[in-house]
Image (cartoon, coloured by chain):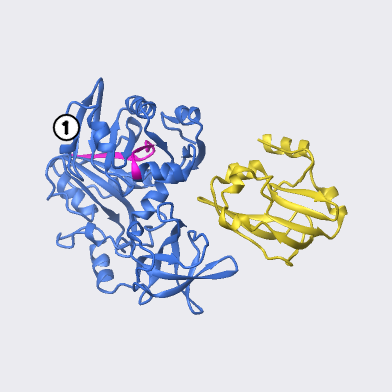
Chain colours: A yellow, B blue
Amino acid sequence: MKTPKELYYQETHEWVKVEGDFAYIGITDFAQDELGEVVFIEMPEVEDQLSKDTEFATVESVKAASDLIAPVSGVIVEINEELEDSPELLNEDSYENWIVKIELEDKSELEGLMDADAYKKLTSE
Amino acid sequence: MEKTTLHKDHVRLGAKMVEFAGYEMPIQYTSIKEEHEAVRKNVGVFDVSHMGEIYVYGKDATPFIDTIFTNNVAKLNQGDIAYGFMCYDDGGTVDDLLVYKYNDTFYLLVVNAANKDKDFEWISQHKKGQVDVADKSNEYGQIALQGPNAVGLLNGMCEKDLSLIKPFTFMECQMGERELLISRTGYTGEDGFEIYGEPDDIASLFNELVESGVTPCGLGARDTLRYEAALPLYGHELSPTITPVDAGMSFAIDFDKTHFIGKDALFRHKQNKKRRLVGLELLKKSVPRETYPVYKGDTQVGHITTGYISPTKGVPLAMALIDKPHDKRGSDLEVGIRNKRIPARVIKKKLLNYKPNQN
């Protein structure tokens, strides 16, 4: 299971990649594997406000629907439109295929998230 | 949790295992979609050893079964199989099952894993005349070989001509050292067999089939396949509160029989249907799931019993239990998905026959 070093993680299996004042958010390799074949992603819209710890999108596999929980707060500046036509990209590479890009509201929220080692430990339990 | 004899083989084949009806079973090996497609286009094999097998035998077995079963076993010939239901007095469903007739005094009942203890109790409680009932579930393994190439494939492995086994009949057959019961039945909407035998024999046959290239298929594909074929699953399309009449299964109820438990209630129900199981086509990309409410305007008129983006059709299709008169083909309804309303239209229940813009 891949767990890139440079990302932040939370226990509900989302990752955050920080670039300056912006962040990309996606789901982990563990999450896509657990879900199985992703068939649909219910996306939020650009300019939607993301609030930490609240649902912002739903990833649906053949078998199950899984709500994504915002690991950090901010305003959505971009959604990954490619996923709307090809949701299966999440199964191919869930780190390359981010779901939303936001402008971070409060960088201190990152401190509460896990690093790769902690997340790896969580998912191997 | 219980395990079937094939458990270690599922793990070896890399299956993702889940709890189902008290058993740890494979939900998928590689991919639900690939397994689904293997069965629609070629051939796949399922471990269904969790199913229950109950013997009912004795001088009065035939009249007895006809008092607890909606279909008619007196009319069956030796080697015939009847699909039908056991119902409560109020018409609610105890279980749906297959009854295999060996002869007038010996029957095999194949029941849902989740219901086998309840069924055994129910049958035993209602025993009449000279009849014995025995739960043989632990002595049987069962696999299902399903798909357009299933018959040809298995025929090459057996001394008898298995193509002589007509739909809803069975034959006993020797395959090497194995003594098997092979029936032309299934739960996928495709041709194929269900094969019963001693658990170790069934396990070795499963492995032999997989080694010869048959796709092993999990419960995930079993569910998407049976839903497209409009085959009900107990707990979803049938339950103590969902009668076989609700589920559109009256073909498996013989109202000409003088008596069976639930007959009067089912008959009244049939004369005055309040709701019906239908197909739904969702008109916007989404994934319908069990329990989602279905609306006409502000009124809830039913719920989804099973839904997916149909692997065969590639569009969101569902089975739903809809109140009359909104069950008519072409009715425009809405499905509540989280905080949204998705437009939907009533279509034929057999989703495999779905064609876009059929209305």
- Residue placed most toward the observer, B210 or B230: B210
Q: Quadrant of residue B166?
A: top left
Give residue B107's position: percent from left, percent from top. 20, 40
Q: Is residue B43 magenta?
A: yes
B245 horizontally vs A19: left or right: left
In the rendering, at what x and y percent does residue B275 appear? 35, 70
**Figure quadrant of the C terminus of chain B:** bottom left
Amino acid type of the residue tagged 1 in the rendering? Asp
Marked residue chain, label 1: B
Residue at x 37% of width, y 43% of height? B117
Identify the magenta region: B41-57
Most foreground residue, B354 or B323:
B354
Q: Residue at x 35, y 27 (%)?
A: B212
Label 1 belongs to which residue?
B161
Residue B21 visible, this orientation: no
Secondary structure at numbered mark 1: loop
Left/right placement of residue B311 relative to residue A86 reads: left
Is residue A1 visible in the rendered structure shown here? yes
Q: Position of residue B281 (x, y in %)?
A: 42, 65
Q: Is residue A88 left or right of residue B74?
A: right
